[in-house]
Amino acid sequence: MPVISEDSFFFITVDTICHRPAITCPPDMGLVEMARLMKSHNISGIVAVDDQKPVGIVSLRDLRNLIADSVNDISGMSVRDVMTTGLITIRSSDYLFKAIFLMAKHNIHRLVVVDENDNLSGVLTDTDLLRVQTRSPLYLVQEIESAGSIEQLHIIGQKMNGMLQYAVKTNADAQSLIQLIAHFNDAFTQRLIYILDNNHGVRLPPGAAFLALGSEGRQEQTLRTDQDNAIVYRDDFSPAKIAEVRRFAERIVAALESVGVPLCPGNMMASNPEWRHSLSEWKQLTQKWITTPTPEDTVYFGVFQDLRVLHGDLFFETELRAHICECTKSNSLFFPSMARNIVRFKPPLGMFGRLLVEKKGEQRGKLDLKKGGLFALTRGIGLIALEAGIMGGTTWTKLERLNHLHLISDHDLEIIGDAFTFLIKMRLEKQMVALSSGKEPVNFIDPLVLVDRDRVQLRAAFRGVNTLLNILKSRYKLDMMAR
């Protein structure tokens, strides 16, 4: 077993500690023979494998229940008769914190590990996790999953900030940190939805979905920033069902605010009737945003484009994404129009690489990482990806898929990717410093307090933003468009 420090535990991959071959059996093996196999290897669970693919699992608990249920002819039964299907799996290349979340979410003690081809790679148990760590997000995840009230979640939310501050200090790569935050945020919101249902009788009716939008939709939040969410429901919903949707929307938005997730200043939230519609209404609205966009519409579309179902029927995510792709492809002016709006957000970089700061106001002497860089990067990459029919996933995922399509040169993609990674990690680090000082986390930084190396990298990141803006200008021929 490798020596793994507390600091690195979050971000090691599953295959680091799961390298023992799994004990397996075919699904048609007799139950008694299977029990003998488990005994000989002294294991508490066995995976049934068919053509190298895991198809089921049998545990000692399953055998105990079988005996307790007084099944008469165990000798005539096969593994297939008792195995649990619908396995919860994890890839060997995934991070351990994902394994922790899955075990806590599904209240299970082992995960089936598969490789990139979905072939069985091994089995990871909670004992494996506890053996290599003394301090991890495991206990906080369990607290989230067992929270019984909104008040308890509020307390856990404060602990989450401490856990994230600890995680940032591990010097893990930015993508891993953001992925960890996304897992925490999803688990937190989903538990809040469970509490509203279980304790308060407030639930989203079947045939509807609660959508995360914007940075949360991309699973790219640095902290639990302003809410951006919406609701979609079936066209045939009765007035009574629509009233249930409204009640859920109002309660979930208020509950999120009560546990520390601020309201959206632009009111792009499910509690606003303009952000909850039937599927057909959403299709009509997004088509309007795409075909005859006003400046306000481009803002709305930019947030809605990154939609993701956080709770409810996944069908709506597939349907809305397909509709958006179809509409944008049939409207030739859409992409140049959106690109022209994006290139207005120029990085704060002057002559000879001088960093340009605010001249007056509360943020005098500082520059805005979001407005000056991250906005253009996320929206610009998202736009080119959308033109290629790519929706969903993080900006890193979109960059990787664009690389496979060769729509942007490898050199430019590397520059843009490095810029995005640096800016999002700097934003996260500065927000954590603000939190630890009892201040509100913001997007502004003072370049004078940065060490020389960070200032050099910041300038390089802003040059990377300019690289993307120039690609947008060239790709969509913006210099030829009427102003």
Image (cartoon, rainbow, N blue to C red):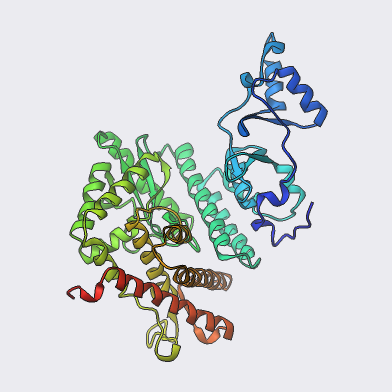
**Left or right: 110 as drawn, with respect to 363:** right
Left or right placement of residue 476 versus residue 118 in this view: left
Task: Name the quarter where the C terminus is drawn.
Answer: bottom left
Above or below, comparing residue 313 to residue 444 in the picture = above
Q: Can residue 465 be seen here?
A: yes
State the image coordinates of residue 200 (x, y, percent, origin top left): 44, 39
Residue in the foreground of this view, choosing between 234 and 270? 234
394 and 436: which is toward the camera: 394
Q: Is residue 380 left or right of residue 90?
A: left
Q: Which of these two is toward me, 365 or 178?
A: 178
**Quick one: 163 or 221, which is closer to the camera?**
221
Is residue 354 among what the camera can see? no
Q: Residue at x 33, y 48 (%)?
A: 321
- Whole-percent x and y of residue 299? 29, 63
Q: In the picture shown, does residue 202 fall above or below 42?
A: below
| 51 left or right, relative to 64 | left
